Structure formats: structure tokens, C-alpha cells
Amino acid sequence: MGRVAVRLGGYGEARDHHTQALTLCTASGDLAGQAHNHNALSLVLERLGDPEESAAHARRAVELYAAEGNEARRAAALSRLGIALTAAGDHRAALACCMEALEILMDLDDRYYQAHVLATLGLIQHRLGAYDEAVAHFQDSVELWRAFENRFEEASALHRLGDPHHAGGDAPAARRAWSAAPALLDDLAHADAAAVRAKLAPDSGCAAPGGGSPADGC
């Protein structure tokens, strides 16, 4: 239920669900369940604007997955920690977490989680002002999600891909990326479709070449 709520943009509902699930998993000693719910709460709390608590849950997920010996999941939690850290403004620490995660996943040849981490690296590089690197990471992520036929994650990566294109001065490429995302998100009834369309609006700060900034989300 928590995952469904996240995909529909219901982050408050997802927080409540995963908090309850974490309490049950902790009481029963279910380490894998605890790790999953800590990682999920990290995502939800970051979306709700609480990066410090998000980072705390991500760190706990990293520890629990390490205790289980689940390297793929540990890498995913490291990527989630990177997102929380960059939301808190600590972009260099975030980059280090995600590069460690990517190295683990390349050793495992785990392309699914690589797609997640590449998108996170794109976000971090964008915030560092390394727009060419951000574009390359997002493009790689889009291609992997398309190969997996994961339309939700493909749309999310396309949405983000437009941002460094725009910030780097390539407004047409930004519009192409943003224009491709809403149809996918509409099919999934996802609330983010409206946010993408807002960037395409003529009166948006993102619409004109050079307009907007990473802080604006464009």
C-alpha cells in the first residue's frame, strides 16, 4: 500500500503505512522488513521536505542491508542516502555515496539498480552545476528504464533530464524531454504530470532560454 501511495503522490499516507510496517517488523525482528521500510521512509520524508530524517532512515537501511549481506539493496540504500544528502545541501557527500553504490552495482552487473543510481547521480551533478555529466547520467537511466519497460521510472528520468539541458542552455532539448514525460505519467495517474506541464507553460521561468535554476526545479 505504501508503494502505491508513493506512485500516486500520496506521501503522507505512505509515511503512515511504512511507519506502521516498520514498527511491526522491528517487533518481530524482521531485519529485511526493517531495512525495506527505513529505505521507503527515506524516500517519503525527502519528498515531504525533511532531508535530515530522510538521511537518518537511509543510513539505517544501509546498515541493515549490510548486516544481511545484501549488496544490491545496500547500494540502493546508499543511493537513497545520496538523495537525502543532496536535498540537505551536502552534494559532495551525496556524490560519494552514489559513486560507491554505482561501483557495487557494476561489480554485480545489476542494471536495474544501476538505472536508479544513474538518475540520482544526474540529480546531484545538476545541483553541482556539472550539466553535461548530469545529462549523460539521466540519458543512461532513461535508456535502461526503457529497456526494462518501466514507464514510471522512465517518465521520472525524462522529467529530470530536461532540467540540466535547460540549465546548460539547451532549451529545445529540455522541452523535448519534458514533453515526453506527461503522457507516461498521465497513464499512471501520477501527480507529477502537472509539475512537468507547468515547466512547459509559456509563462514559466523554465520556458524561456536561460530561465529558471536548479532551485526552481528547472
Image (cartoon, rainbow, N blue to C red):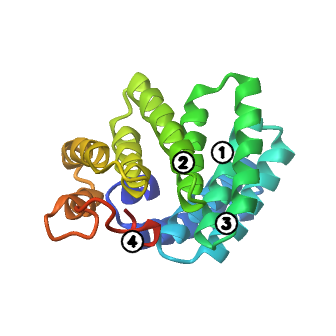
Tell me which label, 1 or 2, sits earlier in the chain: 1
Residue with the mark numbered 4? 216
Neighbours of disc 4 within 10 Å: few (<14), some (14-19), many (20+): few
Quadrant (top left/top right/bottom left/bottom right) for the C terminus: bottom left
Q: Nearer the viewer, mark 4 or mark 3?
A: 4
Which mark's residue is nearer the viewer, 1 or 4?
4
Sequence-first tag of 3 and 1: 1
Q: Amino acid at mark 4?
A: Asp
Q: Specify the quadrant of the image occupied by residue 88.
A: bottom right
Residue 83 in the image, given as x and y percentages of width and height: 60, 59
Which residue in the protein does label 2 denote?
122
The residue carrying mark 1 is 76
182 lies left or right of 170: left
Question: Badge 2, how many Cα within 10 Å: few under 14, some, many 20+?
Answer: many
Residues 209 and 52: in front is 209
Tell which of 202 and 38 is nearer to you.
Answer: 202
Q: Which amino acid type corresponds to the residue marked 2 in the rendered image? A: Gly
Q: Picture coordinates of residue 91 (x, y %)? A: 67, 63
The residue labelled by disc 3 is: 85
Label 2 close to label 3 by CB (< 8 Å): no
The answer to whether the residue labelled 4 contacts the one labelled 2, judged by CB atoms less than 8 Å apart, is no
Report the residue at 60% width, 34% height from top.
114
First in sequence, mark 2 or 3: give its number.
3
Q: Amino acid at mark 1?
A: Ala
Query: Can residue 107 be seen?
Result: yes
Q: Secondary structure at mark 2?
A: helix
Foreground: disc 3 or disc 1: 3
Question: Closest to the observer: 88 or 176?
Answer: 176
